Every structure is written in structure tokens, then in C-alpha cells.
Image (cartoon, rainbow, N blue to C red):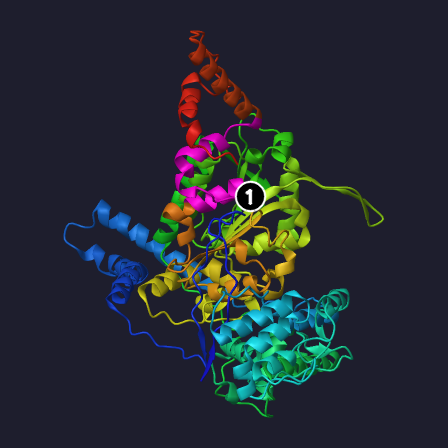
Amino acid sequence: MLTVNDTLPRDHDDFSIDKLWKNDPLPEEIYPRVIEKHIPERGYYIALGLIMSIWMITPLSCAYLIWFVLLGQGLRGGLGLTSTLFAAYALTEVVFAIYTSYLVRWVQTPTPASVLPLEARNELFRRVLTSDLGYSVPERPAESDDPEKQMDMELWNLYRSGHLSEARYHHAKDRKYEMIHGIQAPGPRVGKMSEGQKDLIGSFVEDHPGEREQRLRDQVEKDVGFGQDDFDDGIMDKHGKLIHLHPMDRRAVEFRERLRTWFNHAPWESLRRQNVIIWLSWSCFNLPYEDVQNNKKWLDFLDASLKMLEARTGTRFPDGFDPNVEMLRLTLDPVNAKGRPLILYAVTNTINWFLREIVYPYQGMGLYREGGIDYLIRIPAHWTPEKGRTEPNAMPIIYFHGLGFGLLQNHLLIKHLLESLPTHPICVPLAVHTSQSIFHERHLRPWTRRELVPAIKNICKKWGFWEQGVEEWGVRKDRSAGGVSLMSHSNGSTAHGWILKDCPELSRRNTFVDPVVFCLWEGGDVDICHSFCYRKPSTALELLLYYFIASEVGIANYIQRHFDWADNNLWFDEIPNVTDPRKTAFFLGGKDIIIDTARARKYLERHGAGKCIYWASQAGHGDGLSGESRDRVVMFVGTGSTRGWQGWLTRGRRTHSLGRDDWQRLKRNLKASSTAAASGSSDDDEPLRRGSEMSSASMESDATRVEDVVVK
């Protein structure tokens, strides 16, 4: 049994520059992983009873309608109005059930083949294979009298002086494990040393300081997929020859264990060459193998991809095919959609309509459409595009919500944004295809990347959030002006990622809450695709998630027919200012049952974004947007900081809501008041106003709190 216990970079508490803390370390990973079968508890059966009571509405309606037609007319005294109304409702449910059955059959049609050219597919596949080959930036070890710790400090000093690369540093620290399995390769030595530990260190030391920096520069300038020596992080050497990892290399073991998920956790030894080829046909071309084998170029591509996969996993796939191995092919497998009664749709859609048409307009939000995308927007009084570009408390905010019940599910957050950030424009694109909006024309036609990105750009131009720079002959003459604070939750991070890929200059701040876009290729036990399509519910929460959300026909259609992992996966270097804790934040929960947040955190930390991660070890999916945790997220979205977030709602947000000129006048007013009081003056100070709406009473209230305010 293999234990992986990676040392993780430490993070910031409120992610400001001057106050540090340490995130809880991740639990060690034990390989091979054992997929435990949970025994259903009492809550599971309570949830099952609730679901059955709702599911039974349709068959009971059918039974009542049959009774009404065949037997009801023979009752003494005839049928009353109530019975007739119930029969009308039952008929509606039966007709709706037939309609949803048609929809479930209609969405089973497989999606067309991928249109990516072979070169793009090859580059994407190579990037997947090299994504976790890198090592995290070493941290300074703690001072200690322990010889082992002293050796770690010596390794650290060699790394800092440029004699050790990051890869060699980590190999040296993992020396015991690698020597046991015969992984270490010989390296240059600086001379004979009598002490064993110093001799071991010397085997990793480079001949000349600075070789690490030069190699990194060459790696960036050429291709991240190529390595220079045995300790580099590429999948190929500089001559284009594949580098096979050792079978017991921790990175190979980890990659194999994650890849097993796509074969329903079958033992790695049971995978045969043909099983993997069939799966690669889907993952690379979105086609069954029968369609791919008729094209020689495609077959050559699959063969080359298989060889790269063998090099990355450190193994060779035996010839043959194992019929007992299940291959998960998301967009080819049957769509896991289930019908549900009309009344459930009626209740949720009525609430969403009430919020959209009554509540939010009363709070200043209007409903608009750009192309085929509906969105809600609130523009504060006296806000101008110039303020949005120059004043930090006027930056526009765009929020991409996740899948579920739409506005009903996100109402508390939207209300929080409107009330806590009154000087910020707020825009919420409505993802009706993941909101159970069965009566909407876009219910089964999800957004596409080519559709959404231009729509968001047009929205920002229309309302003055952003002006695109001018280009002539491929040369930018005028820089873009303005920008927005982008926020996303769960599946909303896919649209968020599209914006960052196609129009990164639009983003001035990025906030990800429970993002689903990292490490999608791994197909982990709790990634969104596996959680929604293949996991068998074993707890009450999983069962409720399966019935009320995952199996809804619109959501199932989106996940299993329109979720393009190549488009939706977001790479670290595609996020602007990803290591700046004032411009980027990731809110992750350790108990998330939908996405593998531990893998996402590890991926981000390996690339130096540890200071931007807010890790809550006991939080589940969505907990970051509920209760007090929501206060912290909203504060970062509006200010770029979480310092003092516990008291920000009662103190800081009042000052943050003031315009910059108003705040300066407020300070001058307070200074004049104190001077007048000291001199015995009885002159009344003129009350300050925020635009034309701030009253004297509100300014006095602000003045009493000024000593408690932290000026951002």
C-alpha cells in the first residue's frame, strides 16, 4: 500500500499582505484507493420517503383519472365540483408526464463529434499528461536540532542559492521512498563526501548555480511538455523521446488512481489496450471507436496518445479487451434523466417568476436580454462609467450562478449583494438551462462559449462597464478601459472560465466559490460529472441531490450532452493575477460531495496560488454562500479583501458605500466639527450628502461609526 503525504504551501487567513495563517493540511492519500460502500442511515430513508411522496403524484393522478372516467359516473348523486377539479388536475399531470417522457427520449441523441483540429487535441492531451508533473514551490523548513530537519534546511539553502531545482529538491526530500523503489537516477556530484547525508544531497546538486533559472526560461520559451534531464517535469525529452515514469513514482501512482475513475474504479491491472483505446476515442473525438477506426489519421493519433498515456502512468497496457471493465463515456452513455410531476415545476417556476418580475424590480433590478441570454441588472443612482473605472466602491459585479433551482436557490446571495454593495452595479445572467425552467425556450438549449462571451462583452459595453481596446493589423493601439469583478459558484465557473479564456482584459477581480472547472480530466469520485451521472446515492443528501437536481431533464441534458470538458476545463495560467490575493480568491469546502476540492486545492497550490485559497475543512458544497461565510465572499467581491469581514456588515460596508469624494468631505466635516467643539463654536455643520439621497440622519449615523471603520 502506498501513502502519499505531500507538503502543501501555507495560506493567508484573510489573504491580506500583512497577516498570515495556515490552512488545515490535507489528509494523506492512500493508494490504491478503496471505494467504500456506505450503509444507508435513517436520514436516507426519510429522504427516500419524501421523494416517493412526490414521485407518486403522477401514478396516483393516472389512477384517479381512470377511476373518474370508468367508475365515477356510477356513483349515487353524481360527481361534485371538487371531484371534477381533481380530475382536471390529474389529466394535466398525465399529459405532462407523457410530454416529459418525450423530452427524456429526445435528449438521448448523442452529441456530434468534436471539431477541434488534431494539433489542438494533441496539445490538449499533452497538457493534461504534464499538468501534475510539476512540484510546488519549496517552503523554508522550521529550525530544529533534528538531523533530518537540519538536512531539510541544507536542501532549502541549496535551492535558494540556485544549486537545486524544485524537482531535485522534492526528489531529495523524498529520498527514502525513492531509494526503496529504485526510482532515483544518478546526478552530478560536487566531490567525495564521507557523510552519507551530505553525499546524498550532493547527488542532486547542480554544477553551477542558476542552472535552474536557465532551464525554466528554456522550458517556457519552448514547450512545457519537454524536460531537459531525468529530474525535469516533462513527458518528453528535448529530442522528442517519451520519458516513462517509474511505475512507483508518486506522480504515476496518483495519475493511475485518478484515471481509474473513468473505468468505474476497475483495478488498474484489469485494463486492457482495447478498453483504453475505446475510452480515448470518446475523450479525444467524442465518438465511439467504431466511427474512429475508419479514419487512419485518427487511429494514428489514438496510438500516439496511448503511448503517451503509458509513459505518464509508468505502465504498459496488455493486449486484448476485458468485457467486465465499464468505460464511462459521458456524452455517449444514456442520459440519466427522470420525470417529475408538474406541480414541482409549477411551484419552483412560480417562485422564480415572482422574484424576477416583482421582488427584484422593486429592489432596482431590471430584466433584459442580450442575444439569447436573459440577465438581471441593477445600476445604482449616480453611478457613471467613469466612477466604475476609477472608484473601488463602484466596480461592476457579474455573478454566474450554479445549477439547481435558479433565483430561488440564489435569492439570499443576490439580496446580500444588492444590500451590502449598493454603489456597485450588479449583473446576474440567468442560466435557465440549469434552473429547471421547463417553460423557457432555452431549457434544453444551453449556453455555448461562442454565444456567451460576446453577449457578456456586449452587456458590459452597453452599460459602460468596459470598453474594448482598438486593434489594427493584429497590433493593439488602445488599451481596454474599465472591467468588472467576476464571481461564480459551482457550475457557473464554466461561464466564468470562458470569459477569462476569450476576454481576460474584462476581468479586474475573480472570485470562485466551489468551482467545478479544475482538473476535470481526472474524473474524480466527486467531480461534477461522476457525482451527477454515475454515483449511486448512499446518503440522504446524495439522494436528494440525485432526484431534485441531477436527474432533472434540463440539467441532465446539459451535463451529459453539452458539458465539453475541453472547453470547460480552466488552466491555472488562464486566470489573470491568479497569485494576487487582492484580485483572486478561491473558496473551497473540505466536505464537498459534488467536486473534489482537495484536488482543486492541491492543483492551485502547486502553481503558487496558496495565498488566494480560503479553505473550510468542514464546509460542504454551497456552504460558502450561506450564513456568515456569505459575508466574507460578498466583502471580497466588492473590496478585494476580507480583513475584518466579521464586522464589515455593520461598520465597513457603510463607509465602502460612500463615494470617494463623499468620504473625503465626511472626514473634513468631522474634523471641522471637532475643531468647533474644542473652540466652543455653536455653528452647525452642513450635513453631507451622498448624491441627492443621503440624509442628515444617515450621515450622523455614519459619523458615529467612523472610528470603527477600516478604510480600504
Q: Position of residue 51 (x, y in %)?
A: 30, 61
Q: Residue furthest right?
A: 473
Asked if the stretch drawn in magenta spans residue 644, the answer is yes
Tell me which segment is drawn in magenta. 631-660
Q: Residue furthest top?
A: 682
Q: Position of residue 653 (x, y in %)?
A: 46, 34
Majority secondary structure in the magenta region: helix
Q: Looking at the picture, tell me which residue is in the foreground, 115 or 602.
A: 602
Q: Looking at the picture, tell me which residue is in the foreground, 19 or 318.
A: 19
Q: Residue furthest bottom?
A: 319
Q: Looking at the picture, tell me which residue is in the foreground, 670 or 96.
A: 670
Q: Is residue 596 visible?
A: no
Which amino acid, by three-letter code, is at mark 1? Ile
With 450 as the anchor, is 627 left or right in this view? Answer: left
Q: Position of residue 321 (x, y in %)?
A: 56, 90
Question: Which residue was labeled with disc 1?
Answer: 398
- Above or below, 112 against 584 in this view is below
